[in-house]
Image (cartoon, rainbow, N blue to C red):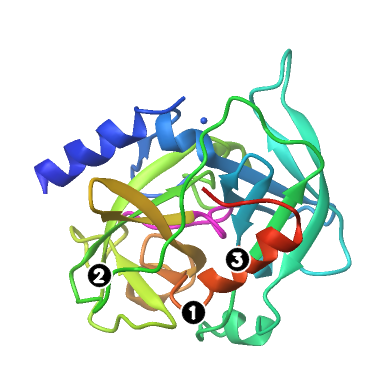
Amino acid sequence: MIRRVAALFAFLSAAPAHALVGGAVPQPDGIGRAVVTVVGSRGNFCSGALVAPDLVLTAAHCVPPGADYKIVDYDAKPQPQLRDLRRVALHPQYDARGIAAHRASADIALLQLVAPLRGRSVVSTAAPVEPIAPGQEFWVLGAGVTVRGDGSSGGQVRAAALISTSQPGRLQIRLVDPATGNQRPGLGACTGDSGAPVLQQQGSGFAVVGVVSWSTGPGNSAGCGGLTGVTPLTLYRDWIVRTARSFGAALP
């Protein structure tokens, strides 16, 4: 575990990029600079990851039709700026009712910015290594709130190491804080972490292998700090690549 943590933090700091409840570690540098905030005209906000300088991978439920969306550029001076989007593509098999019920769905979306975000990290995408076993480690990087119900506690990227439960699969992965096991409040996604990248160590680096789709409180109650539901890219990475090409962009 210590070796894996050291490897991730070395990777996070290798490149020039702000949450999760339960005391997640702030991660403003390295791969943390690939994490962005997606805001909608209806007042919602989510996390996402730059998979190219002008492409953001997030969850489809974060960008439903009927609203306008922008990316928050925290690097802009003298204050953060809202960056416009050119296109928003939702996976054609996305089912909003399924995600609301915590069922597996193609909860994947790709956003194209009008102009690339300069000076930010980008992350590669991949399918999770199979088979996915219970207790397997994944990292979540999100910019959501650290205190449920307190929107002002969000906006800073934080990282948390979570493990898969006894029911991992190709369509959905459920993650939990290994220290609390969904029995009491612990690390986990919360408001604003939807769409956040879920990373897995593959070889000498880390790749985004899924996005956050939902969360619960301990014991599957309402809230945060219990389960973190993830949509893995196993069945959807090809769509991401094809959609990026249709936008005239290429993934690293």
Observer-nearest of 211 and 223: 211
Residue depicted at x 33% and y 75%? 219
Residue depicted at x 21% and y 62%? 180
Residue 136 visible in image: yes
Q: Residue 27 location, x and y as percent?
A: 40, 33
Observer-nearest of 15 and 186: 15
Nearest to N terminus: mark 2 or mark 3: 2
Between the residue at mark 3 and the residue at mark 1, the CA separation in whole angstroms equals: 10 Å
Q: Residue 78 location, x and y as percent?
A: 73, 13
What residue is pinned by disc 1? 235
Q: Looking at the picture, does residue 192 appear above or below residue 97?
A: above
The label on residue 240 is 3
What residue is pinned by disc 2? 183
Observer-nearest of 250 and 197: 250
Instruction: Answer few, some or many: residues within 10 Å of disc 3's Cα (few below 14, many 20 plus, some between 14 and 19).
Output: many
Q: Is residue 72 rendered magenta in the image? A: no
Q: Looking at the picture, does residue 104 appear above or below residue 185?
A: below
* Boundaries of the magenta span: 187-196
Instruction: Answer few, some or many: residues within 10 Å of disc 1's Cα (few below 14, many 20 plus, some between 14 and 19).
Output: few
Nearest to N terminus: mark 3 or mark 1: 1
Between the residue at mark 2 and the residue at mark 3, the CA separation in whole angstroms equals: 36 Å
Classify residue 116 by image quadrant. Answer: top right
Residue depicted at x 25% and y 70%? 183
Classify residue 226 by image quadrant. Answer: bottom left
Mark in the foreground, 1 or 2: 1
Q: Looking at the picture, does residue 43 appear above or below residue 214?
A: above
Q: Is residue 190 rendered magenta in the image? A: yes
Total labels drawn: 3
Label 3 is placed on what type of residue? Ile
Q: Residue 246 location, x and y as percent?
A: 74, 63
Assess whether mark 3 and mark 2 are in contact (beta carbons under 8 angstroms): no
Assess whether mark 1 and mark 3 are in contact (beta carbons under 8 angstroms): no
